[in-house]
Image (spheres, rainbow, N blue to C red):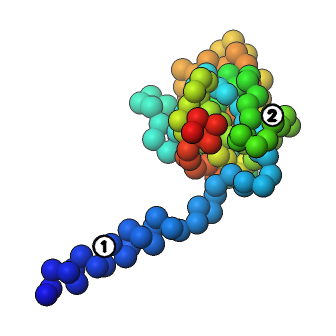
Amino acid sequence: MKKPALMAAPLALAASLAFAPTASAAPADTPTPALGCTQVINLDKPPLGTNIDAINRVAAALGLPGVPNRLGAVCQTPEQTDAEHGVTNYPGSGPIILRNAGPALFQEYCTNSVSELGGTAPLPGTNVNTQGLVVFGSGCVTQPNPIAM
């Protein structure tokens, strides 16, 4: 008798998580600009040798609200947000979807972003190529790419 009762609590928790709304998901009714980047870095789990303090300083100097948790490098390719909307131009700041170039299964939706055209030197604190648009995102979550489905 005790075994089913012990299993009910974990199953209820799993069900509640499965049906919980994603607070930071890209809005379905409003097209969000999406960019294909040669490299998208999750700063919550940065590559070894990444100087997070240097990245935070650059993002703050550009006016990013919050601490950056995603970084897109060489984000030159505008992409569709989803199958229902065409390409929406990125104004250089605001909500953004970052995808690795090519058919990416996942994307990074960021509620805030700022960008800067890079130069020939790597981004401070990284070995990231900056010869193109560099996007700093905050309030970012990983989600499935609806275009790849």
Q: Quadrant of residue 130?
A: top right
Q: Say whether residue 19 is left or right of residue 89.
A: left
Residue placed under numbered mark 1 in the picture: 10
Disc number at residue 131? none
Q: Amino acid at mark 2?
A: Val
Residue at the spot x=22%, y=84% of the render?
A: 5
x and y, in percent, of residue 88 in the image: 83, 37
Q: Is residue 84 above or below residue 122?
A: below
Which quadrant does the C terminus fall into?
top right
Residue at the spot x=56%, y=31% of the render?
A: 104
Which quadrant does the N terminus fall into?
bottom left
Q: Is residue 81 visible?
A: yes
Residue density around tag 2, few if under 14, some if 14–19, many if 20 or more, within 10 Å: some
Q: Amino acid at mark 1?
A: Pro
Residue placed under numbered mark 2 in the picture: 87
Q: Earlier in the sequence, mark 2 or mark 1?
A: 1
